[in-house]
Each structure stands twice: as C-alpha cells, then as structure tokens.
Image (tube, rainbow, N blue to C red):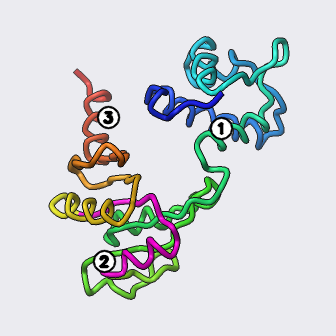
Amino acid sequence: MSRSPSDVPNPAVRRLSLYLRQLETLAATDVATVSSRKLAQSLNLTDAQVRKDLAYFGQFGRPGVGYEVVPLIQRLRGIFGTDRTTHTLIVGAGNLGRAVAAYGGFRAKGFELVAVFDSDEKKIGRKVARLPVQPLEELPEVINKHDVRMAILAVPAGAAQAVADRLIELGIRGILNFAPTPLQVPSSVTTRSVDVAAELEQLSFLTSAE
C-alpha cells in the first residue's frame, strides 16, 4: 500500500519517527521481535494507536509474533526516504548553525551535509564541520551540483523570509527553520520550525510551581 504524504496526519508521522527511534534502540540490543503493546508501552501510547499509525502504510506484524524489528526499521526508513542519502545544506554559520552542522548523526540517518553558507564576509572561508563557509552567491552552483532539495535555515528572524524565498526559487522543497519567525511558502514547499526559546518557555511553564 502506498499513500501520498498528504493523506497521513502529521501526528501519525511524528509518532512514526518515535517508533523508528525505539526500534533502532531495540535492534542495538539484539531484540528480534516486539509486540505492538510493548512498543506502545515504551512510548506511553496504546497498542491500538501503534497499529493504526502503521496501517497507513500497509501490514507489518504477524499474529502471535509481533513486528520483526530489523525489517520494520528498513520499511520505516523507506517510508521516510532515509534509506538513501539525501543532500542538505545549512544557511547561517552563527552559533546555532555551527552547532547544528556539528551534529554527528546526519549520515547515520541518511542525510549528508554538503555545504554551509553565510552572508557575513568575516565568516566566509572559515571551516564549519570540515566544510568551508560559502557566500550566498554560490547557492545555485551547490544546489545544482549536489541536487539539494532540503535546507536548514539558521539565520536571524529578519533575514529568514528573504533567504527562504531564494532557496525556494533555486528548487529547495523542504526547509527546517530554526529562525524564530514563521515562513510564508507556497503549497509545494514543506517547512518545519524549531523555535528553541519558545520550547523552553513552554517547558518552563509546565514545570513551574503554582
């Protein structure tokens, strides 16, 4: 069974990521099979929810056996498209951009960082995650050379929309946005925003004493 991404609710997609992480943890400890109940309990979900989410993409488990961990990992990676290498780039070589670029798990998850860009001439040429920071003028060449379709945005809020517009114009179809501002994009482009300060505010609210 194949479904268009638009047919699958966003909460189900987010839970699918959780299932994949948990399955990878099980595989690392040589667990061969897991039931929907055990998988659900490890994530504070119900087994019915796990089965419903996976059912968007076909039949996976076997009655009395459960899910085979490694094959299910492979299927989920195929669903996410991370069973193959996806080239991505970062725009913004400030503190946040450098921290994101230094993350060592990109390649293991199927992503290869191919370039880092910034508009600050003082940063051009400096190494970030073993990559030289390039000027924005070189975006077209890099995107075409590496067939980049996804980008990470780690620029100030005031510059985010203009940079996003330029990326989209050059063929980028997915943007992970770390800038603390929403982006206006066409329906053909998908964005995910990570506002670290907002998340900390919400965490503070939820953990503060009355």
User: x, y (%) of residue 177?
Assistant: 33, 53
User: x, y (%) of residue 147?
Assistant: 51, 67
Neighbour tally class for label 2: few under 14, some 14-19, many 20 plus, Cα within 10 Å: some
**Local SS, label 2:** helix
Neighbour tally class for label 3: few under 14, some 14-19, many 20 plus, Cα within 10 Å: few
Of callouts 1 and 2, the N-terminal one: 1
Looking at the picture, does residue 100 appear above or below residue 202?
A: below
* Disc nearest the viewer among 3 and 1: 1
Residue drawn at x 78%, y 36% is 71
**Local SS, label 3:** helix
Left or right, 82 with reference to 33 = left
Residue drawn at x 65%, y 34% is 22
Q: Which residue is mark 2?
A: 136
Foreground residue, 172 or 182?
172
* Disc nearest the viewer among 2 and 3: 2
Span shown in magenta: 137-155
Tag of residue 203: 3
Quarter the N terminus occupies: top right
Dot 1 amino acid type? Leu
